[in-house]
Amino acid sequence: MSISMRSIVFGAAVAIATSAIAADLPVVQPDEVGLSADKLNQIDKMLQDRIDSGDFPGAVLLVARNGKVAHVSALGKRRIDGDIMTDDTIFRIYSMTKPITSVVALMLVEEGKLDLNAPVSRYLPEFKEMTVATGTADDGAIQTEPAKRQIKVVDLMRHTAGLTYGFFGTGPARAALKAENPGNGEKTNREVAQVLGGLPLEYQPGTTWEYSRATDVLGAVIEVVDERTLGDAMRARVFEPLGMTHTGFSVDRTEDQSLIAEPNDDDRMIGHIAVFDPAEQRRFETGGGGLVSTAADYATFMQMLLNEGTLEGTRLLSPFTVKYMLSDQLVGIEKGKYYLPGQNYGFGLGVAVRRVAGGAAEMGSVGDFYWGGAAGTYMMGDPSENLFFIFMVQSPSNGTAMRAALRNMVYGAMTNLGEVDD
């Protein structure tokens, strides 16, 4: 049986979903997989309260355990004065794109076409001779020193390339990137990489974790190695095999564009950048943050990871490769100015990875992994509990504030530890 959402009424608010979850993930009652229906419904009540207060028009929450969906709720509306939210609603997932880009790259690694230890310049020559910003001269010129080593492919995947983002933070490297603004949608992946290759780095390669356009550069590497656009590579390697029919860099079919969720009118900016229009095709297929998707589609991707690389008889990666991807890669690496993974989290190849069970404000297990998107979307997977959840919302200003509460409430809904027998 595939998913059909039960109606849930909280006063005048109705949560209803009408479509089926992709890949026919089986649907069970929460208690069959060690979860409390009452506790999961409390999460819906919390989200509905936020919707009623005007924080965002609507949201979708999906919780799964042991390969089975135990809870899915679609609350509020897709947009203010718009259609009722359904579980096939399409969301901008921004940086939840990054783990998918990492999976495509790791597939190429397994095929011997891409070398994690190779310098990026093997694939993108503009990265051969990089400089690192050291300060700003009195005349405003950026002072630099030569990079001590080249950026490696693995640096792109673990955010240790020395690159940065220009839409937040300060510093000469960020100012240079912001001035160039290569990620405005007008350039291709290859053209963006050429711009980045001519700008100074913020850190020496391999020394420091700093969130950056590294995954965008990885997308350009994939295009060179796989000899097709990143969108085509993702479609052939991930979306089609997993049945992710509503995931891509744009919503091309006119009949699907009514499914796109929108933020409130006063909540459409991420830093100084407006949220993109998913109905428009952009030249920049950014591997770091350009995809749109549904909770249903992303659930198949998450289940593939928890299944150690396989789903419904389709294997994308070996179990060992997935284990490597979800392992902390930051031993001996410093934290940068903006260390997003959080306390007692390291970073794997595209996701934050928990190092110890305690010591953080969010509940979790050693080895749990997560990442989110700038418009508020969020995913978390826990291999030891065979558990994941996906939260879809479009609210750059309010979406991220609920992530810790969502995690703690999902863990609080557990009634058994460890895998529950069928």
Image (cartoon, rainbow, N blue to C red):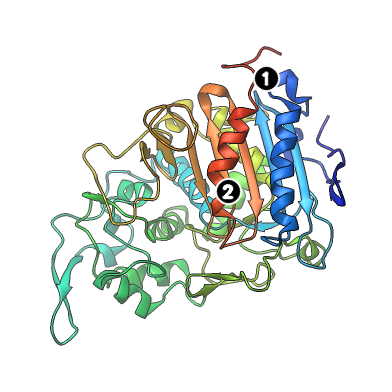
Q: Which residue type does callout 2 highlight? A: Met
Q: Position of residue 381 (x, y in %)?
A: 54, 34
Q: Which residue type does callout 1 highlight? A: Gly
Viewer-proximal residue among 326 and 174: 174
Lower sequence index among marks 1 and 2: 1
The quarter of the displayed image where residue 57 is located: bottom right
Compared across the picture, whether 373 is left or right of 32 comes to left
Is residue 243 something that shows in the picture?
A: no
- The residue singled out by tag 1 in the image is 34
User: Label 1: how many residues lie within 10 Å, few (<14), some (14-19) or many (20+)?
Assistant: many
Numbered mark located on residue 402 in the image = 2
Compared across the picture, whether 250 is left or right of 214 comes to right
Q: Residue furthest top?
A: 421
Compared across the picture, whether 420 is left or right of 170 comes to right
Compared across the picture, whether 327 is left or right of 381 comes to left
Q: Position of residue 367 (x, y in %)?
A: 44, 29
Q: Residue at left 16%, top 61%?
A: 147
User: Label 2: how many residues lie within 10 Å, few (<14), some (14-19) or many (20+)?
Assistant: some
